[in-house]
Image (cartoon, rainbow, N blue to C red):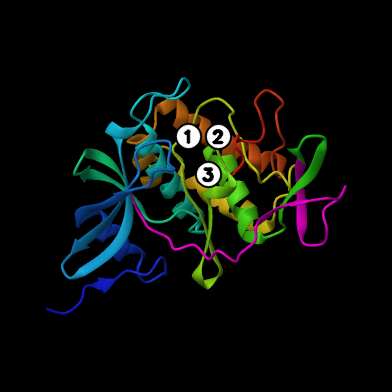
């Protein structure tokens, strides 16, 4: 018997194959990711001679949250993938909602991160150096602070726009996965799409800056895709509430109206804790 075909982390020609494999393949649990706050299982998925590594997060393993409805985090992860795909940026790994060994859950293609890519740093300076954007000052030990910075990277900037659209309440450094081919992915989108403003992120370096022409074009296309009756709106309607879908439309509209990256509202902690 020949070895199974491996699905690469992402390419234009294999997205559909990866999504089909995740949705239809047989899931085999290989281990648990113990650092995750909710149940996250490392698996392989195999179908018709193809195989890939993936993450399976069963709804049954979700811990209740005070501000999000119980049993909805997996759906929100899939909704974030749907919106990412609609922008054309491919910032979220292929993700599906399906039944698995422990019931319904989110299944997402595993991404092998490139560890040498530096996207975040703490620097002993008042201002960021060339190629970096300031986030905030952070206490690193008793009586000493350092400036938290992130790379002035177009991939991060796209992700900052996506986070503003999906209202990501938990964009931590550990949720950024630089991958082969200079790709960048964001993961862990369970606390997204709330109807109230809950944006918490480490990617505030462009706060108040004009959106790029590319971002405005993506948002304009997304606005059309979110209209009643559009396929994306229909898919999201099965994953989030009507109020959350309306709030998503409103966020896209506000970004287009202002033409700027959002700024911290002051009504909610702007940076997640812990930040990494």
Q: Position of residue 205 (x, y in %)?
A: 73, 47
User: Between tags 3 and 1, which lies in front?
Assistant: 1
Label 1: element kind: loop
Residue labelled with disc 3: 223
Residue 73 in which image quadrant: top left
Left or right: residue 57 compared with residue 245: left
88 is higher (above) or lower (below) than 6: above
- Asked if marks 1 and 2 touch (Cβ < 8 Å), the reply is yes
Magenta stretch: includes residue 113: yes
Residue 211 in the image: x percent, y percent? 70, 50
Check residue 79 for magenta coloring.
no
Looking at the image, which residue sits at the far bottom?
Answer: 2
Can residue 71 be seen at all in this image of the molecule? yes
Tell me, for residue 169, which label it has, or none. 2
Residue at the far right in the pictured view = 126
- Which residue occupies the extreme front position in the image? 142
Mark 3–mark 1 Cα distance, whole angstroms, equals 22 Å
Q: Which residues are magenta?
A: 107-136
């Amino acid at each position: 018997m020949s070895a199974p075909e491996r699905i690469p982390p992402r390419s234009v020609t294999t997205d559909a194959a990866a999504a089909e494999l995740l949705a239809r393949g047989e899931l085999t649990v290989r281990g648990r990711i113990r650092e995750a706050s909710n149940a996250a299982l490392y698996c392989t998925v195999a179908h018709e001679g193809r195989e890939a590594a993936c993450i399976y997060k069963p709804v049954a393993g979700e811990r209740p949250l005070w501000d999000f409805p119980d049993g909805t985090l997996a759906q929100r992860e899939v909704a974030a993938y749907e919106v990412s795909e609609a922008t054309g940026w491919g910032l979220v790994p292929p993700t599906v909602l399906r039944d698995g060994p422990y019931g319904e859950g989110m299944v997402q293609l595993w991404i092998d991160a490139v560890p040498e890519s530096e996207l975040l740093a703490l620097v002993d300076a008042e201002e960021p150096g060339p190629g970096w954007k300031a986030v905030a000052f952070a206490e690193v030990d008793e009586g000493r602070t350092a400036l938290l910075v992130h790379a002035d990277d177009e991939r991060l900037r796209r992700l900052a726009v996506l986070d503003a659209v999906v209202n990501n309440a938990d964009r931590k450094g550990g949720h950024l996965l630089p991958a082969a081919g200079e790709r960048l992915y964001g993961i862990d989108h369970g606390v997204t799409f709330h109807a109230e403003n809950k944006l918490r992120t480490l990617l505030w370096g462009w706060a108040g800056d004009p959106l790029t022409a590319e971002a405005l074009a993506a948002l304009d296309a997304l606005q059309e895709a979110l209209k009643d009756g559009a396929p994306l709106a229909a898919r999201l309607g099965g994953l989030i509430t009507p109020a959350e879908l309306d709030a998503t439309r409103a966020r896209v509209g506000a970004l287009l109206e202002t033409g700027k990256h959002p700024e911290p509202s002051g009504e909610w902690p702007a940076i997640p804790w812990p930040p990494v």
